[in-house]
Image (spheres, rainbow, N blue to C red):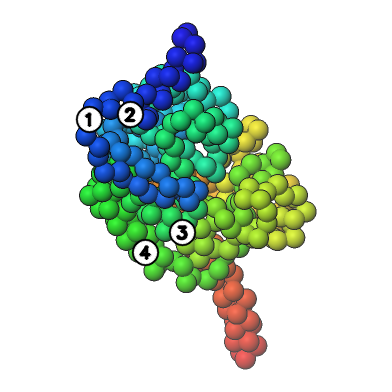
Amino acid sequence: MKPIAFFLALSLLSVTGLADQVSAPESPRCVQDDLNRRVCTVKPVQRIISLAPSVTELVYAAGGGDKVIAVDDHSDYPEAVQALPRVGGYPNTSVEAILSKKPDLVMIWSGGNDSRLSAQLETIGLNVFYADPIDFDGIASVIRRMGKIMGTEAVAEKNADAFYQHYQSIRKEFSQAEPVNVFFEIWNNPLMTVNGDQIISQVIELCGGVNVFATARPRVPKVGIEAVLAQNPDAIVSSKSVQGGLDIQSRWQKYPQIKAVKNGFLFTIPGDLITRASPRVLKGAEVLCQQLQDVRAFKKKSELTPVSNAENSTAQGKH
């Protein structure tokens, strides 16, 4: 393997443009990333590396798919990504592999990528854009900003508009529905969930649900089973049907006092449709919204049944 110093020299030449001082200066493209950093590119972006699955999906949504030269080990959508070179994945992303690709721009998920890796890439001199949308407005916004810095504004604007219109249609249909208390299970052992500053919680709210741990801290807090019992959610939702060799029913069957368990409202949604802050999160929202509609239908039926029985008893007493 060539020494990292060699790759560093190549990278600095590429990023600063020292190897091409004779060319005429070009107007920079500048945007704010999700860490409120000003990120600029002077020459057209042609070589992008993405280091998170959600960020990869956002880059493609912004029209930059043909510029992506490598991704992290976990990026798997869209299908074209599967043929791209890999540079490792959290927590073992290879700085040497990134440098060897001589990217114009590295796209990082600030909410999940290793902060030490990010600092190292910036110190080396690579141009880094941080993406971390935590709500639907943020997804549309980052698509537009990515499009601007990549020079793909037309595609980015079109896809951002389509995403936002889809979001608004779901919101119109479900956000005012009867509230359903939801516990979202990120992991079972230890038991972990999400607070309100996370896209999953935004999906729950979009569907008219209530995240029972919305005010917890940090964004992915550990919670005790006693806390879940105290919240007594109407539905338990997980992004993994099987954890530790147990399906969601087996994981929760020992707590029949929880309404979600007692009434059989234990749901799963594919993780890449609800944990990734990308346009596909609305597909996950459509699934969850229908699941919560099932809970509402059950609750409505349960509320009507005692009334019907009382009326029948009264009617029979008159004969």
Which mark is drawn over residue 17? 2
Nearer mark to the viewer, of 3 and 2: 2
Mark 3 residue crowding within 10 angstroms, few (<14) / some (14–19) / many (20+): many
For the point 55% across and 68% down, which residue is it? 179
Mark 2 residue crowding within 10 angstroms, few (<14) / some (14–19) / many (20+): some
Instruction: Look at label 1 and name its amino acid.
Output: Ser
For the point 59% across and 87% down, which residue is it? 315
Earlier sequence position, callout 3 versus callout 2 = 2
Q: Are marks 1 and 4 in contact (CB under 8 Å)?
A: no
Task: Give above or below for 25 relative to 295.
Answer: above
Task: Give above or below for 36 relative to 215.
Answer: above
**Is residue 72 or residue 264 the one in the foreground?**
72
Instruction: Look at label 3 and name its amino acid.
Output: Cys
Earlier sequence position, callout 1 versus callout 3 = 1
Which mark is drawn over residue 23? 1
Residue 47 image-quadrant placement: top left
x then y, percent, for residue 143:
35, 49
Nearer mark to the viewer, of 4 and 3: 4
For the point 55% across and 40% down, which residue is it? 112
Q: Which residue is mark 4?
A: 168
Q: Are marks 2 and 4 in contact (CB under 8 Å)?
A: no
Instruction: Look at label 4 and name its amino acid.
Output: Gln
Residue 42 image-quadrant placement: top left
Asked whether, in this view, residue 19 is left or right of residue 49, the answer is: left
Q: Are marks 1 and 3 in contact (CB under 8 Å)?
A: no
Instruction: Look at label 2 and name its amino acid.
Output: Gly
Which mark is drawn over residue 289? 3
**Is residue 288 or residue 301 the one in the foreground?**
288
